[in-house]
Amino acid sequence: MNWPGSSSRAPTANASTGAWRRLVSGEEFAYRAELPPQERTALSYERLRLLNEAAGDPVELATDPYRLAGLHEWTGPVDGGLTTLASIHYNLFLGSVLDHDGGRSRDLSAFTSLRHTGTFLCTELEHGNDVASMETVAVFDRDTGGFHLTTPTEGAQKFMPNTSLTGGPKTAVVAARLVVDGEDRGTFLFLTPLSDESGHLPGVRVRRLPQRTGTPVDHCLTAFDGVWLPRTALLEAGHGRLSADGTLTSSLGNRRKRLLRSINRVTMGKLCMSAGTLGMSRAALTIAVRYAYSRFLAGPKAGERVPLAAHRSHHGRLLHALASAYAMTFLHRSTVRRFAAQAAEDRAENRAENRAEDRAEDRAEDRAEDRAEDRAEMEREVAVAKGWITWQARAITIECRERCGAQGLFPANGLADLPLNIEGGITAEGDNLVIWVKAAAEMVFGHQVTRPPDRTADLGDRELTELPFLRDLLAEVEGIWQDRARTALREGPSGDPVGRWNVTSDAALEMVSAHARLRAADAFLAAVALTTDPRAGHLMRNLCRLFLLKQLGEHTGDLLAEGRLTADHVRALPKAVDTVMAELAPHLMTLVDAFDLPAEVLSSIPIASGSRVGGPVTTPQEPEVREPEVREPEVREPAVL
């Protein structure tokens, strides 16, 4: 969407926005309050088929990070179950098949037409975050050249995949240990039919799990009793190819690396989970702000009625949430771009290496090592962004639900299910805390914080309105916590790795948190620098300013102690926040209108369309708003960072 009166693009804009936005505008995607859980699950599968018809070529969708992210952003707010099913089918299942040898030459018509829905079986009942310890095995059969897929223990049952008969026949990619002549060769993926029109196939045991929180999905426990698979079931690539005589060749030196390469679609899955929760945050804010202008209270004068939005105690919380939502959006956009660029570079390099017949082996190894480092850094940034975005999304949707009072408790008003659906995003594709702990361990010494230069001499002249100054303070916060983590690790108890990490982890996680917020701020500032319309630019700078001031509030003590702030700065901070809020408050509706939620979706939500659950229609009334005077402090705004 275009911002009102602006040629600048709104924060939701990307190449695939239009198609997915039109799709969810249809009445087929309206909330159905009367449906029990199993029928809601069946409806999500019906909607998956509608989505597939609108997707064009499903193979191209599965290989396009931008379209996959857009799909999740727009389906997340209307049907969390559909978002889960689509993420599994297009990214984890179809994407995994396509990422391996011969993926495009296989007959994928059953999956691209959704005659069979794809699913992904990796996590086991006893092996979640320690998936490297999974027990499911695929034993190579020399007589047939195929494999016998077996679940050896109760704890090895695949946990939570959507493998019931709801939605029709299913086929899975199953993560299992490849065993050749009794030797474990590492974990690979196997293409495994689970069911057909008559039911589950022989040897496939499926037990439906109890209903979880959020929009219902047909989660199950799934086990295999020696299910025979043909040779073509093994998904192979450079990380592992099995010859007819059972010899495994691999470009990777250990089993753990082979596992990570096999399930590398989980990285794109993190971006998908972030995108879905991002869309939910923006929807929640749109609903809450519209409600704030249609819900009236007694005013200070007799007989006067004022909207909820008039009160700082109400709109202040929504403005902080809006600033975070914009920062989350820009961070997600920049992270998707980095992921897509890395993927394109990897494909190009692989093609070049395949064409080069006489390349020097040492140069090839050097290039491969550089690419591995770049890929590892990209994957870490994806994990950090996923954790921060999904945690912020939960906080935003809870805040919006509370700001709508009792009306927010009714799922028909579009808010009650969102925090529960976001819980799934926090856990899926790597539990947030676990992936942040991994990032923290890598970043203590493996990441160098770029700290701002020391400007103590002119510190008293710096203003809390200066975006570059605020940004540099946040970079200093990351550096402070990295220093503390390094000191703690060096001084921790020797000979006790767990003890050393225990005294380091809190500071290291604070460093990761500051890093995520700094990356979000940089993405926000880059978007500000690209905004050409004066009015939009003024609003964006103020919103970015509010975001940065909020992030710095809890760290003023450290910044004061390190000589990066003066006592006058600390005293002035509350006033600075209040001033920018006063400027932004009249523009709440403009800021959420830029999210471009379809009118058809909003009209089906009572409190977003001037109505109530159980009440009459009330037309939202915005206050008279003067166009802001576009005048900024005498500072130079940063270039694109």
Image: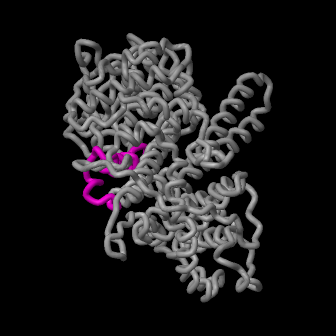
Q: Quadrant of residue 395?
A: bottom left
The residue under the point 25% across, 40% down is 155
The residue under the point 52% across, 56% down is 439
Depicted 167 relative to depicted 286: above or below: above
Q: Quadrant of the C terminus?
A: bottom right
The verdict on residue 179 being magenta is no
Depicted 542 relative to depicted 22: above or below: below
Count of numbered tags: 0
Q: Quadrant of residue 251?
A: top right
Considering depth in this image, is 214 or 626 the residue closer to the camera? 626
The residue under the point 40% across, 42% down is 602
Question: How far across and down, in percent of the image, does residue 461 sit?
Answer: 73, 83
Considering depth in this image, is 256 or 302 the residue closer to the camera? 302
Q: In which quarter of the image is residue 482?
A: bottom right
Question: How far across and down, in percent of the image, does residue 223 sit?
Answer: 26, 29
Using the rendered image of the protein, determine whether residue 183 is visible from the camera's viewpoint. no
Query: What is the image's colouring?
Result: one colour
Span shown in magenta: 402-430
Question: How far across and down, in percent of the image, does residue 126 sit?
Answer: 29, 44
Depicted 136 relative to depicted 432: above or below: above
Q: Main secondary structure of the magenta part?
A: helix
Q: In which quarter of the image is the N terminus?
A: top right
Considering depth in this image, is 317 or 169 the residue closer to the camera? 317
Depicted 208 relative to depicted 395: above or below: above
Judged from this view, the residue extending furthest toward the front is 303
Judged from this view, the residue extending furthest toward the bottom is 567
Tell me if 590 is positioned left or right of 639 in this view.
Answer: left
Using the rendered image of the protein, determine whether residue 194 is visible from the camera's viewpoint. yes
The verdict on residue 406 being magenta is yes
Question: How far across and down, in percent of the image, does residue 335 sit?
Answer: 59, 47
